[in-house]
C-alpha cells in the first residue's frame, strides 16, 4: 500500500521532506499559500545553506 502525505509549505523543510519521501517512493503533495514566483524568488545562498545543513542532519540520522 502506498502512503500519500500532504506537506504544508514549500519552504526548505517542506521541499526537503518531499525529496526524502520521493526517494523512498512515498507519494506526497505540497500545499503552499504563496505564489510559485514567491517560492522561486526565495532561493538563494541563505536558503541553500539551510537546505545543505538539513540534508546533512537527515543523512546522519538515517
Ligand atoms: C530575514 C531572514 C534572513 C535569513 N537569512 C538566512 C541565511 O542567510 N541563511 C540561512 O541559512 N537561513 C536564513 N534564514 C532562515 C531561513 O529562512 C529559515 O531557516 C528557513 O526558511 C526555514 O524553513 P522552513 O521550511 O522551516 O519554513 P519557511 O521557510 O517559513 O517555509 C514555510 C512555508 O510554508 C508556507 N505556509 C505557511 N503556512 C501555510 C499554510 N497554512 N498553508 C500553506 N502554506 C503555508 C509559507 O508560505 C512558506 O512558504 C533567514 C530568515 C529570515 C527571516
Image (cartoon, rainbow, N blue to C red):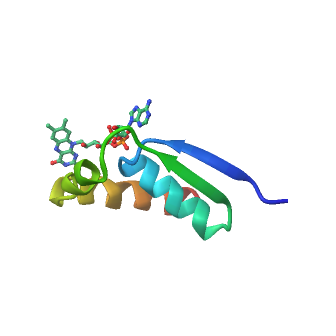
Residue 62 in the image, given as x and y percentages of width and height: 60, 60
| Image position of 37 (left or right of 6) | left
| Image position of 56 (left or right of 58) | left
Residue 26 in the image, given as x and y percentages of width and height: 68, 61
| 25 versus 8 height, above or below | below
Q: Residue at x 60, y 60 (%)?
A: 21
Q: Residue at x 34, y 57 (%)?
A: 51
Q: Residue at x 24, y 53 (%)?
A: 37
- Quick one: which residue is furthest to the right in this view? 1
| Image position of 53 (left or right of 61) | left
Disc tally is 0
Give the camera-side residue of 34 and 2.
Answer: 34
Ligand 1 image-quadrant field: top left
Q: Which quadrant holds the N terminus?
A: bottom right
Give the camera-side residue of 2 and 38.
Answer: 38
| Image position of 47 (left or right of 60) | left
Residue 47 in the image, given as x and y percentages of width and height: 24, 53
Residue 16 in the image, given as x and y percentages of width and height: 45, 56
Q: Residue at x 51, y 63 (%)?
A: 19
Give the camera-side residue of 48 and 58.
Answer: 48
Amino acid at each position: 500500500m502506498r502512503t500519500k502525505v500532504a506537506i504544508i509549505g514549500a519552504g526548505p523543510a517542506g521541499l526537503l521532506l518531499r525529496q526524502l519521501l520521493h526517494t523512498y517512493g512515498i507519494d506526497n503533495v505540497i500545499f503552499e499559500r504563496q505564489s510559485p514566483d514567491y517560492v522561486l524568488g526565495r532561493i538563494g545562498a541563505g536558503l541553500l545553506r539551510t537546505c545543505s545543513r538539513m540534508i546533512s542532519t537527515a543523512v546522519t540520522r538515517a
